[in-house]
Image: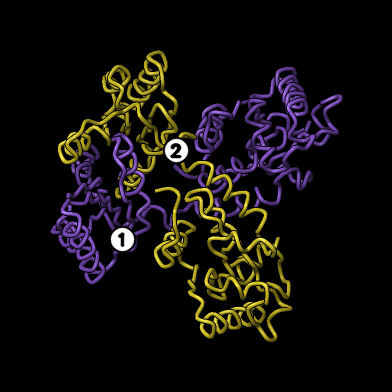
Chain colours: A yellow, B purple
Amino acid sequence: MKTAFYISDGTAITSEVFGHALLSLFPVEFNHQTIAFVETKKKALETKEIINKVAKKSGEAPLVFHTFVNHEIREIIDSCDGVIYNFLEHFISPIEDQLGIKAMPKAHRTHSIHENTYDYRIDAVNYALANDDGGNIANYAQADVILVGVSRSGKTPTSLYLALQYGIKAANYPFIDDDMDDLKIPDFLIPHKKKLYGLTIDPQRLMDIRDGRLANSKYASARQCRMELRAVETLYKKEKIPFLNTTKFSVEEITAKILAETGLHRHKY
Amino acid sequence: MKTAFYISDGTAITSEVFGHALLSLFPVEFNHQTIAFVETKKKALETKEIINKVAKKSGEAPLVFHTFVNHEIREIIDSCDGVIYNFLEHFISPIEDQLGIKAMPKAHRTHSIHENTYDYRIDAVNYALANDDGGNIANYAQADVILVGVSRSGKTPTSLYLALQYGIKAANYPFIDDDMDDLKIPDFLIPHKKKLYGLTIDPQRLMDIRDGRLANSKYASARQCRMELRAVETLYKKEKIPFLNTTKFSVEEITAKILAETGLHRHKY
């Protein structure tokens, strides 16, 4: 199996995202290896050695995705027996020409605590946890968005992703069985109605998820799932709450759709 | 202010990561705009119109970072009045040559539910939540890693990031004031000692964080913070628990360091 290396002097997240975006276009299995925090010449030489060993043992040149701008370290990695794909290098010079200024590689690093949006993100994680699953109905004034929906429709992972990635304070409130007879927006949510965003899901997918949690329960039954979903979708339409069916979407896609539709202010790009 | 657009037929996360990595090298403020899910010619034409309006109004060509491989949509976006940076385009052909096969753009999309690691990630989020803050000491057999440390040293955001991004099941267990007199590994953690990973933090930073939570409390006092940190660091060293000082690191960096040091099996790259 071919090996792909993702290498950086930081987290290597950027190298991974771009290498993965490229390699996923090819129907080939890879052995993925990340080597992060290659910050010294010594670590760079060790890394080169690891790549060269893989090349020698497999008889195939590994693919090496990296983002080094520091010349000394870059030269060491570039001299390995792998094939080098450097994402930044190719684009820096055209952007310098476009902006009319030189890149300043040491000014700032992505994915570090020095990004000025970092505290927003940690605050938002704490907010999401404290306000998960209707945990604290007194706190909704601080919410940027309040996700509503039946149990297991994707509210919690979405609120955590909104917080961790974008610093958005997302509360979530579940509609439960007891609410269903005459489903309304609860009184304490009415002042925050403009922040509501509904999630729904296909009944079969909901049954599968709930069955994994509480097998053969009323909670996971076809009848219960269908009834709850019908009730919340009716409510969303009647109250004009924007909503999304999450069945076919990942948490990244759900989040991106909520951001696109609501225009929420993000603390990170 | 110059505008940077991040555009894609999916979440646009890849465009954002790469555009941000590049623009953060320049000491220039940008107005960032993401346009996700540009999946149709109609949406592409609307997007082109938005870019052209910004170009006209500002008198400056916006920077447009995109990842289109579909020709019809790509041609529409490429014909806008912005300057185009297409990350994938430049690298596809050299990788095709290297692998000896053609890219298959429709086979797979990154950040979608169809990635075969998606369920691991959602399971891991549920695990992290159920096992946050010592929530369920009976569940540690299923943990991939158990983060330990004093309150507010970074355990919870790190365990959520490990779960959401990498599908790693991270429990976390807090050492609290009552444990400190004679700090030991609790009996129920001893069978899982090899999974323990310690977090620590500088006393001043811990005081600041705790003071934001409970101002002027014993919990946030210099004496208490120093005492707790001294006790846990002594324990980590005595018991040879690997540990990390989180003070200067983001949740991405803490996670990358834990992955590098432990070699944990990731379900996503």
- Above or below residue A23? Residue B194 is above
On screen, residue B190 versus residue B38, left or right, reads right
Of badges 2 and 1, the one in the foreground is 2
For label 1, the crowd category at 10 Å Cα-Cα, with few meaning under 14, some 14 to 19 and many 20 or more, is many
Tell me the tag on residue A27: none
> Splitting the image into 4 quarters, where does residue B80 fall?
bottom left
Mark 1 belongs to chain: B
| Left or right placement of residue B105 versus residue B227 in this view | left
The image quarter containing residue B12 is bottom left
Q: Residue A25 at what x, y percent from top left?
A: 30, 50
Contact between labelled residues 1 and 2, with CB atoms less than 8 Å apart: no
Q: Residues within 10 Å of mark 2 (few under 14, many from 20)?
A: some
Which residue in the structure is indicated by mark 1?
Answer: B9
B186 displayed left or right of A236? right
Q: Residue A93 at x, y = what percent?
A: 18, 34
Q: Residue at x 55, y 51 (%)?
A: B120
| In the rendered image, the vertical position of residue A126 relative to residue A39, given as above or below | below
Q: Which mark is residue A115?
A: 2
Residue A232, position in %: x, y? 59, 79
The one nearer the camera, B61 or B229, is B61
Separation of residues labelled 2 and 1 (CA atoms)? 27 Å
Assign a secondary structure to mark 1. loop
Residue at 52% x, 72% y: name it: A194
Chain letter of mark 2 equals A
Q: Are marks 2 and 1 on the same chain?
A: no
Q: Give the amino acid type for the residue marked by disc 2 in the picture.
A: Glu
Q: Position of residue B188 (x, y in %)?
A: 81, 36
Q: Is residue A121 above or below residue A226?
A: above
User: In the displayed image of the protein, which residue is found farthest to the front?
Assistant: B216
Identify residue type, mark 1: Asp
| Total numbered labels placed on residues in the image | 2
In the picture, measured across the screen, residue B39 lies left or right of residue A193, that is left
